[in-house]
Image (tube, rainbow, N blue to C red):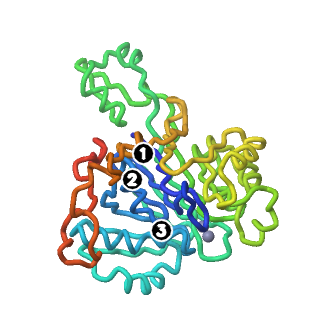
């Protein structure tokens, strides 16, 4: 099962020319889960190889404007396309109140919108993973989110299965699925005879905005990936403390104490460009990266090499070679009529503005 993180916005508080506001897409198999939706997130998705897919779930970490202002615009675009797929937005307490205001901005929607307030400890359970909210320290109602996969069955010992006389074919699958198999001579083979010990699933923690906090450390223990903010460098540690943000140093110390596989620092103040932040953190915790917008972290299983940063991994086809038309009019693939006009123009209703139908990953919709 593929699992990765697509960084759509890596700037804190205000955007820069190169970095957008908070937005991280979790892709697991065919599932797409957005965490935070800063201003401009829908356009970042459009510019990426992901496209503006009909996200079924969005998790908000907290209600500072740089983490949710992209939502009303995105919800509106979905409505203009005539979306029918329901959408659930999760967030810490205060979500219903926030949407009391936002509803006046985005108006009527063509799909069902469900709001779910999650307090630390609450979560959503899926067949083979869960996403749980955890406490952070940011001075207001705020969550981090951790995705924890269920343990995987142990390694299947092919040689032992053959030695025991298990015929190749469906019996292998049954054993791997935990079922006892009866052989033609009437004897039985139990799964534990051919399976190694269960292997842990992956764990990815996204802390949102927070100072380096004990509650984050507890959740992040042994995580494959910790995405943590580093708004400031250690030179501005007083400012970080006042504003309840982290420094590259404090985040790296936390990652080292938690023994994470990879630390990804994000939410950089616009006074930094990245290299100074990564240098500072790596002096303490070498397995640190500072993703740029459109970078991906591929969360591979440990036996496949563990998590790694893929630079520009989510750049859209037209982003890579700057393929502007000779007249500079921009994306040659964009359909006429896709832009312009009032966003409330009924003529646009139902038009898949900017949709990339048919260009999803092959894995989309696989489950
Ligand atoms: Zn923020
Ligand atoms: Zn904040």
Describe the element under mark 2 as helix, strand or loop. Answer: helix
Measured from the top left, where is residue 196 in percent x and y? 48, 28
Residue under the point 62% across and 67% down? 135
Q: CA distance from mark 2 to mark 1?
A: 7 Å
Q: CA distance from mark 3 to mark 2?
A: 14 Å
Measured from the top left, where is residue 180 in percent x and y? 33, 32
Residue under the point 30% across and 19% down? 166
Quarter holding the N terminus is: top left
Measured from the top left, where is residue 338 in percent x and y? 25, 63
Residue for badge 1: 315
Residue for badge 3: 39
Bin the neighbour count of mark 1 within 10 Å (Cα to Cα): few under 14, some 14-19, many 20 and up: many
Q: Are marks 3 and 2 in contact (CB under 8 Å)?
A: no
Residue for badge 2: 47
From the viewer's perspective, is residue 213 above or below residue 1?
A: below
Pick whichever of labels 1 and 3 is earlier in the sequence. Answer: 3
Q: Tell me if 227 is positioned left or right of 165 in this view.
A: right
Q: Splitting the image into 4 quarters, where does residue 285 fall? A: top right
Q: Tell me if 36 is positioned left or right of 184 in this view.
A: right
* Towards the viewer: 116 or 246: 246
Q: Are marks 2 and 1 in contact (CB under 8 Å)?
A: yes
Describe the element under mark 1 as helix, strand or loop. Answer: loop
Residue 194 visible, this orientation: yes
Instruction: Dividing the image into four quarters, tell me where ligand 1 lies.
Output: bottom right
Residue under the point 57% across and 74% down? 64
Pick whichever of labels 2 and 1 is earlier in the sequence. Answer: 2
Q: Splitting the image into 4 quarters, where does residue 229 fall? A: bottom right
Residue under the point 49% across and 60% down? 23
Measured from the top left, where is residue 318 in percent x and y? 36, 45
């Amino acid at each position: 099962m593929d699992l990765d993180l697509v960084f759509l916005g890596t700037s804190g508080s205000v955007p820069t020319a190169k970095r957008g506001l908070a937005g991280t897409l979790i892709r697991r198999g065919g599932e797409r889960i957005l965490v935070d939706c800063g201003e401009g997130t829908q356009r970042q998705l459009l510019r990426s190889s992901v496209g503006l897919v009909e996200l079924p779930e969005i998790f908000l970490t907290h209600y500072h404007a740089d983490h949710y202002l992209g939502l009303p615009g995105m919800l509106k675009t979905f409505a203009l396309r005539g979306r029918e797929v329901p959408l659930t937005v999760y967030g810490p307490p205060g979500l219903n109140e926030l949407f009391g205001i936002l509803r006046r901005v985005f108006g009527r929607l063509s799909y069902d919108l469900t709001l779910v307030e999650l307090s630390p400890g609450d979560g959503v359970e899926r067949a083979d993973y869960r996403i749980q909210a955890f406490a952070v320290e940011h001075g207001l109602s705020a969550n981090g989110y951790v995705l924890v996969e269920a343990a995987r069955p142990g390694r299947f010992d092919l040689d032992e299965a053959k030695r025991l006389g298990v015929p190749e074919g469906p019996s292998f699958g049954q054993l791997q699925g935990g079922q006892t198999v009866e052989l033609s001579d009437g004897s039985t083979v139990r799964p534990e005879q051919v399976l190694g010990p269960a292997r842990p699933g992956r764990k990815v923690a996204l802390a949102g905005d927070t100072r380096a906090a004990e509650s984050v450390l507890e959740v992040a223990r042994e995580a494959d990936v910790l995405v943590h903010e580093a708004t400031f460098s250690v030179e501005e540690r007083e400012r970080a403390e006042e504003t309840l943000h982290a420094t590259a140093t404090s985040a790296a110390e936390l990652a080292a104490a938690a023994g994470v596989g990879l630390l990804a620092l994000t939410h950089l103040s616009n006074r930094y460009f990245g290299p100074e932040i990564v240098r500072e953190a790596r002096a303490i915790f070498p397995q640190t990266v500072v993703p740029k917008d459109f970078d991906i972290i591929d969360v591979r299983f440990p036996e496949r090499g563990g998590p790694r940063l893929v630079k520009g991994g989510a750049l859209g086809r037209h982003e890579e070679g700057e393929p502007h038309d000779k007249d500079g009019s921009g994306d040659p693939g964009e359909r006429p009529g896709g832009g312009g006009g009032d966003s409330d123009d009924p003529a646009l209703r139902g038009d898949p503005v900017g949709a990339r139908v048919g260009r999803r990953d092959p894995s989309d919709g696989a489950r």
